[in-house]
Amino acid sequence: MTTKRLLKVVYLLILLWPLSEGKVNGEHVVLCNSASANASVYCTCDEEGMDEATDISCYIFGPVDHNNEIWKGFSRQSRVKQLSFTSRPSNPLEFVPLESLARTPLVEELYIKESSLGTLKKNSFSHKKHLRTIILERNEIRGLGKHSISNLPVLTKLSLSENHIQELRKGSFYNLPRLTFLFLDRNNITWIEDNTFVHLPNLSELELWNNRISHLSQNSLSGLVSLRRLDLYKNNLAVLGTDIFSGTPRLQELDLKHNQISEIRPRAFNGLKYLTTLQLNHNRLKELPNHAFLGAMNLRFLEISDNRLKYVQASIVEDMKNALTEHFILYFKGKIIQTISCVF
């Protein structure tokens, strides 16, 4: 290396040294285990030395904004793999702290709780190539903007439980090729736009229980080609339309209990050849149409208790080849009935 190039390198190192030390205006920003770092934020670290911490938990005690000095302190801890933020109810964090994420390129797990995040904006977490888990529970999230959670190549688990989300729109979840678990339970969801989940080809479990969903179209669940478990417990579904589960061909468990289902249309469960467990108890069914479960020939556990049914037609179980084996169980009117092939 020539003397001229060496001088340039040394000059650049001198310029970058304050940033690597977390300096602001000539002063260190102390991040770990220091109440003096910032009156509004206190962070605990598993290790305090520079670039030694792998787990940081921050507690928000007062108002903070995007320009708060505390975010610059993360430059001293670029090896963090687990990062969490928890707010006090009186001073909730009102934004995703992207400044801290930009300075922690290796983070794998992100937790934000008890905050007030409103509507998540576009690319709220994008291009974090190591991020595997995002937990955003109890954050008063009202909506998900287009591509709000997107471009995360190894994200496996996403939880948005216990928020105030009212609608799910297509494009909110984009380019999440490895997402396996999605939790949307205990929100206020009333509507799912067609093709909302088409960019989640490896999703295995979808939790939508305790919402207000009243209708599903044939394309509401499109794209969920790997889904194994779907939980719709305690919603407002009234009618199960034809082919509404056609987008979930590998579904094994389906929970529909505690809805308002009064009608099951022909072929509602068509194509669900891997479905083994179906819960329809605590609904408003007065009768079941002939061949109601046609297409779900491998059902082993069917619960239809606590409806308004007086009998079950023979055709209901004739379509299930396992109904003639000792492995089939039907819960009906509070009783467990096995190996059924007749009218009750």
Image: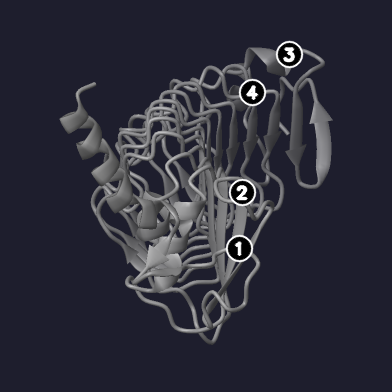
The alpha-carbon separation of the residues under discs 4 and 2 comes to: 50 Å
Q: In the orientation shown, which residue stands out farthest toward the bottom?
A: 90
The alpha-carbon separation of the residues under discs 3 and 4 comes to: 11 Å
Q: Position of residue 198 (x, y in %)?
A: 31, 33
Q: Residue at x 38, y 74 (%)?
A: 68
Q: Secondary structure at mark 4?
A: loop
The amino acid sitting under disc 3 is Leu
Q: Are marks 3 and 4 in contact (CB under 8 Å)?
A: no
Q: Are marks 2 and 3 in contact (CB under 8 Å)?
A: no
Residue identified by numbered label 1: 32
The amino acid sitting under disc 4 is Leu
Residue identified by numbered label 3: 324
Residue 36 in which image quadrant: bottom right
First in residue order: circle 3 vs circle 4:
4
Q: Nearer the viewer, mark 1 or mark 4?
A: 1
Q: Secondary structure at mark 1?
A: loop
Residue 105 in which image quadrant: top left
Q: Position of residue 242 (x, y in %)?
A: 36, 34
Mark drawn on residue 334: none
- Around disc 3, counting alpha carbons within 10 Å, would you say few (fewer than 14), some (14 to 19), or many (20 or more)? some
First in residue order: circle 2 vs circle 3:
2
Residue identified by numbered label 4: 299
Residue identified by numbered label 2: 53
Q: Position of residue 6 (x, y in %)?
A: 24, 32
Q: Are marks 4 and 2 in contact (CB under 8 Å)?
A: no
The amino acid sitting under disc 1 is Cys
Q: Are marks 2 and 1 in contact (CB under 8 Å)?
A: yes
Q: Residue at x 52, y 40 (%)?
A: 108
Q: Quadrant of the C terminus?
A: top right
- Around disc 4, counting alpha carbons within 10 Å, would you say few (fewer than 14), some (14 to 19), or many (20 or more)? many
